[in-house]
Every structure is written in C-alpha cells, then in structure tokens.
Image (tube, rainbow, N blue to C red):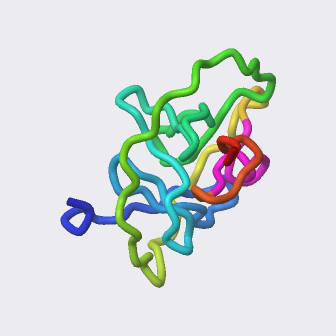
Amino acid sequence: MLETQKPLPIYTSNGEAGAIFVKPYIFNLAGEWIGWVDADNNVLSVHGHFVGKLSADRRIVRKREWGYGRERKTPPPAPPTIRPPTHFPFAPTLPELPTYLVDVLIEHPELMPSVDFGDLRDDMD
C-alpha cells in the first residue's frame, strides 16, 4: 500500500522538510513512524495523542494556548518502515502563521516521538 503512494514533505515554517507524509502516516526524516492524520486532518502521535492539524500548506500547526482535554485515540496498525527520499522539492512560499498558532515541528517536536520514545507512551509494566 505505502509503496504506491508518493511521499510528500511536511514543511516547517522556515521552509525545510520536517517530516514525510504517506497517507495517512507521518514519518520523521529517518523513516520512523511518528504519527498519522485522521479524516478531519487532525495529526495524532504514534501513542494516540492529539498533536495539531495538518494545514493546507502541509505544516503541522496547533493553537499556542492549548487545553489537553482531548481523548486519546487508538493508533492504526504500524506501517512498514519507509526508505525516505534523499531530497525534497523546495517549499512553496509559506505565509506567516497567525500569532495564536505554532509550528509543531519547530516549537514542539517532542510531541511526535517514534514508537519506542516519548514521555506519553504507555508504561511497560
């Protein structure tokens, strides 16, 4: 399934590729699964926690002032590891984010750890 889809870069506000999107999965630049996008463009971590929204210009954004009342979702089955592209196209000119939004990949990358990392993963007990 993933081999037939073209990997798309998710950009950061400074124009760099920060992650890779292969619908519905998100991978870091090393090819490790770090999240997924649901039908409402919500971005969730591999541990099922809400991270933000995937914007139309392919950035992961969230409100600066955020309440943590969202319910955790069950992650989909883990995808196979991907081989990330060696280079990405230049980012389009990205508009400045409104002051109430932050770029998650720049300001809160810890919200999107790989499966075996992260403070919000389940205890192993």
The answer to whether residue 46 is above or below residue 89 is above
The segment highlighted magenta reads 102-113
Q: Which sits in the foreground, 118 or 21?
A: 118
Q: Which sits in the foreground, 92 or 125?
A: 125
Quarter the C terminus occupies: top right
Q: Position of residue 12 (x, y in %)?
A: 63, 56
Q: Is residue 3 left or right of residue 52?
A: left
Q: Which sits in the foreground, 45 or 20?
A: 45
Q: Is 52 one of the magenta-colored residues? A: no
Residue for point 69% across, 57% down:
117
Q: Position of residue 2 (x, y in %)?
A: 26, 62
The answer to whether residue 20 is above or below residue 48 is below
Toward the front, the furthest residue is 125
Q: Is residue 28 left or right of residue 41?
A: right
Residue for point 35% across, 29% down:
39
Residue for point 55% across, 54% down:
34
Residue for point 67% across, 48% down:
124
* Picture quadrant of residue 3: bottom left
Q: Position of residue 20 (x, y in %)?
A: 47, 62
The answer to whether residue 37 is above or below residue 105 is above
Q: Is 107 one of the magenta-colored residues? A: yes
Q: Position of residue 95 (x, y in %)?
A: 62, 44
